[in-house]
């Protein structure tokens, strides 16, 4: 976010009303001297390029490819994730939960929006919404169905409640017929929702159709 974004005509801007309000607030804070533009730019660059779901996808792809790395994730996920240089706020205490043919894991934060930022970025709006936070606990199968995830009745659904102390990352099941793929190709199959548990990993064909995943 450079300082030249105020040169355009807001009347013809394609920014949403919310985005315009954010930029107006940003300008006010900078003009009043409460924050520095350079600090804002650094913060935005971090969330645009250094944290986010692609980091989590790399963690999952490594776990699928390297049994020793998966074991380190099980023992101390925060440390194992730090091996890939994914560290920072909201990533101090991460625990992985693994999907299997018998168990599907799903993450929610019933109190607010605790979320593992270094590997998933900022939480989506629906993750913070009261309906998701309440219904994920009392009707997880129904919520999953609304996300397009239909599981066999015999599959157990475990819901994990994130807190300020513990944040969860779901390791989805590796799709079939992916034995020959390298980590980069595997990471393209891993979506943000699959790592929250409201989705599953894509097949290579689905990832190709979606342009390489989320």
Image (cartoon, grey):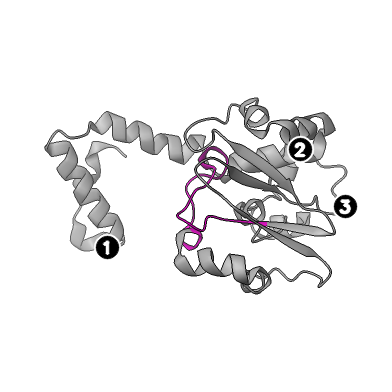
Left/right placement of residue 209 relative to residue 70 reads left
Q: Give the SS element for disc 2.
A: helix
Q: Is residue 33 left or right of residue 173?
A: left
- Residue depth check, mark 2 versus mark 3: number of the one nearer the observer: 2
Which residue is drawn at the image coordinates 18% and 37% (left, top)?
Answer: 30
Callout 1: SS: helix
Q: Which residue is mark 1?
A: 17
Picture quadrant where residue 208 is located = bottom right
**Disc 2: which residue:** 63
The residue where tag 3 is placed is 177
- Earlier residue among tags 2 and 3: 2
113 w.r.t. 150: above or below: above
Q: Secondary structure at mark 3?
A: loop
In the image, what residue occupies the spot 79% across and 52% down?
A: 173
Tell me whether circle 1 and circle 3 mark residues in contact (CB < 8 Å). no
**First to last magenta residue range:** 106-127
Is 186 covered by the magenta stretch? no
Q: Is residue 116 magenta?
A: yes
Q: Give x and y (percent) for residue 184.
A: 71, 39
Q: Position of residue 60 (x, y in %)?
A: 71, 42
Q: Foreground mark, 2 or 1?
A: 2
Instruction: Name the residue at 20% across, 48% down.
Output: 25
Instruction: Give percent across and percent down for residue 85.
Output: 59, 26
Q: x and y percent of residue 123 in the render? A: 49, 52
Identity of the residue drawn at 81% across and 65% down = 155
């Amino acid at each position: 976010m450079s300082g030249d974004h105020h040169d355009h005509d807001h009347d013809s801007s394609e920014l949403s009303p919310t985005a315009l309000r954010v930029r107006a607030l940003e300008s006010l804070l900078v003009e009043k001297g409460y924050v520095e533009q350079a600090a804002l730019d650094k913060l935005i660059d971090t969330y645009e390029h250094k944290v986010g779901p692609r980091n989590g996808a790399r963690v999952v792809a490594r776990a699928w490819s390297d049994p020793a790395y998966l074991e380190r994730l099980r023992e101390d996920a925060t440390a194992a994730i730090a091996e890939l240089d994914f560290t920072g706020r909201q990533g101090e205490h991460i625990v992985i939960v693994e999907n299997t043919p018998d168990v599907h894991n799903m993450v929610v934060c019933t109190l607010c929006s605790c979320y593992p930022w270094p590997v998933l970025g900022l939480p989506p709006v629906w993750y913070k919404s009261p309906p998701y936070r309440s219904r994920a606990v009392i009707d997880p199968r129904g919520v999953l169905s609304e996300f397009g995830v239909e599981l066999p009745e015999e599959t157990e659904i475990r819901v994990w409640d994130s807190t300020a102390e513990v944040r969860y990352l779901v390791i989805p099941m590796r799709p079939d017929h992916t034995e020959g793929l390298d980590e980069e190709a595997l990471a393209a199959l891993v979506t943000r929702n699959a790592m929250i548990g409201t989705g599953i990993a894509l097949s290579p064909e689905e990832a190709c159709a979606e342009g390489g995943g989320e």
